[in-house]
Amino acid sequence: MSLFSVENYTSALQSLMPPGRAWPRDSSSVQSAVLRALASSFQRSDNDAQRLLSGAFPPTATIMLSEWESTLGLPDDCAISEIGGIRDRQRAVISKLISTGGLNRSYYIQVAAALGYTITITQFRPAMVGMSVCGDALNRDEWPFTWRINAPETTINYAVAGGAYCGDPLASWGNKQLECSINKIAPSHLNIIFSYS
């Protein structure tokens, strides 16, 4: 994982040593053994820093995942009994981070996608002269504030049992988390209908 090997670090340390007989460059010398030991610790430190960076970034969080969850108040009411593995927990963190609010359909589609759901949204409008044609629904005044969330009947989220340490695949079915998450962030004037095909 480190960009540099122990040999790279050893070579860099040896090039920093002053010239002369007191500083032998022979690979079997005690000085070279000490420099290799120091280089090994530098390489381990480099590996740990790389792991910390990837483990702290929300989409790949492992080391810092519990800190992200506690900061964002997860698991919340929508996630309880719906989140199984590490991937589901990472999705919940990402969804919570991007749930900053919005009134357009693309925002809600993006939040659902972060949770692992593929949806479309149908927006209704009342019948209006000049805009409606024969055969259109005669929707009343409350319909501009009604959205139909179109989702698959059952969404299967594949996870790995026990996180990244076990290879047995698991799956969870259902859309309870989608409904709860959308209803939680939707403005109070919006009437949301869920339609499963």
Image (cartoon, rainbow, N blue to C red):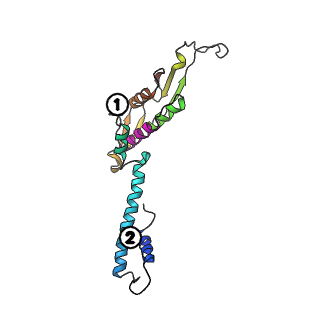
Where residue 52 appears, x then y in whole percent? 39, 54
Q: Is residue 160 visible?
A: no
**Badge 2: few (under 14), some or many (20 or more) residues near its Cα, within 10 Å?**
many
Single out the mark in the foreground, 1 or 2: 2
Q: Which of marks 1 and 2 is nearer the N terminus?
A: 2
Q: Pointer 1: what residue?
A: 77
Where residue 174 appears, x then y in whole percent? 39, 31
- Image point (45%, 22%), residue name: 188
Q: What residue type is labelled 2?
A: Ala
Q: Pointer 2: what residue?
A: 39
Left or right, 147 with respect to 50, comes to right
Q: Nearer the viewer, residue 167 or 150?
A: 150
Q: Is mark 2 on a helix, strand or loop?
A: helix
Decide whether the magenta segment is chiefly helix, strand or loop.
Answer: helix
| In the rendered image, the vertical position of residue 162 relative to residue 30, given as above or below | above
Is 6 covered by the magenta stretch?
A: no
Q: Which residue lies furthest to the right in this view?
A: 130
Q: Can residue 40 be seen in this view?
A: yes
Left or right, 106 with respect to 30, comes to right
| In the rendered image, the vertical position of residue 84 relative to residue 61, given as above or below | above
Q: Distance between the residues labelled 1 and 2?
A: 49 Å
| In the rendered image, the vertical position of residue 164 relative to residue 118, given as above or below | below
Where residue 84 appears, x then y in whole percent? 34, 39
Q: Is mark 1 on a helix, strand or loop?
A: loop
Magenta residues span: 81-100
